[in-house]
Amino acid sequence: MNPFVGTKNVVSPEALCQILNGHKTQDSHYFLRWAHQVSGFIQELPTDFPSPEGQMFNRDRELRWKRRGNGFSVLLLSTVGDESDFSPIGKSWKTQDQNAHVHPPTATRFPKGIASLKVNVGQRHFIDAQTSTIHFVALTVQS
């Protein structure tokens, strides 16, 4: 495992879709956020995409995006190594996988109506290897 953390700015929704499609795998899931709603865990992008912010995650990586003006800022949290088109953050990372639990829609811990699709969600901590500080917590699909 060769962890990598990097960023990239894209100028259009089409460019964002191109990045997402380039990193999508069969076990990829999305979680999209608008000011008035969240999508829950879904496997396909809706017709009203892009959302102002969201994430796509699978076993190997999480891609997060947030609208910045007319474009998007994209963060990549990956366990499969360097991505040449992303600007690296930090020099050396280590990861630690943790279990996670999706509460039922009746629980008050999440907004009502979050769909889980029965995805087995986990967390991956991205830890600075020099300081042992956790900087990012990514969603991941567990086996």
Image (tube, helix red, strand yellow):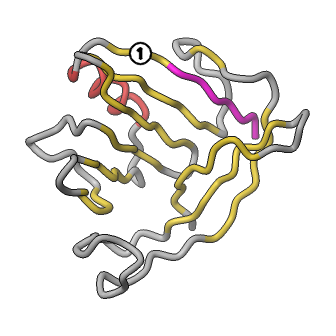
Q: Is residue 76 above or below residue 58?
A: above
In magenta segment, residue 141: no
The residue that appears at 61% across and 50% down in the rendered structure is 137
Say which residue appears at 67% left-offset and 30% top-offset: 4
In the rendered image, residue 49, in percent from the top left (x then y), is placed at 16, 38
The quarter in which the N terminus is drawn is top right
From what the image shows, is residue 86 above or below residue 142? Answer: above
- Specify the farthest residue to the bottom: 106
Task: Say which residue appears at 14% left-offset and 47% top-offset.
Answer: 46
Label 1: element kind = strand
Queried whether the magenta region covers residue 4, the answer comes back as yes
Classify residue 57 as left or right of residue 142.
left
Q: Nearer the viewer, residue 67 or 63?
A: 67
Left or right of 97: which side holds 57?
A: left
First to last magenta residue range: 1-7
Residue 5 coordinates in the image, percent (x, y): 64, 29
Instruction: Determine the residue positioned at 27% across, 28% down.
Output: 17
Vertical position of residue 111 compared to residue 83: above or below = below
On screen, 137 above or below 143? above
Where is residue 64 drawn, in percent x and y?
44, 37
Residue most extreme to the left? 47
Residue type pointed to by label 1: Asn
Residue 87, percent from left and from top: 59, 14
Q: Residue furthest right?
A: 130
- Give the left or right position of residue 142, taking residue 13 as reference: right
| Figure quadrant of the C terminus | bottom right
Q: Which residue is mark 1?
A: 9
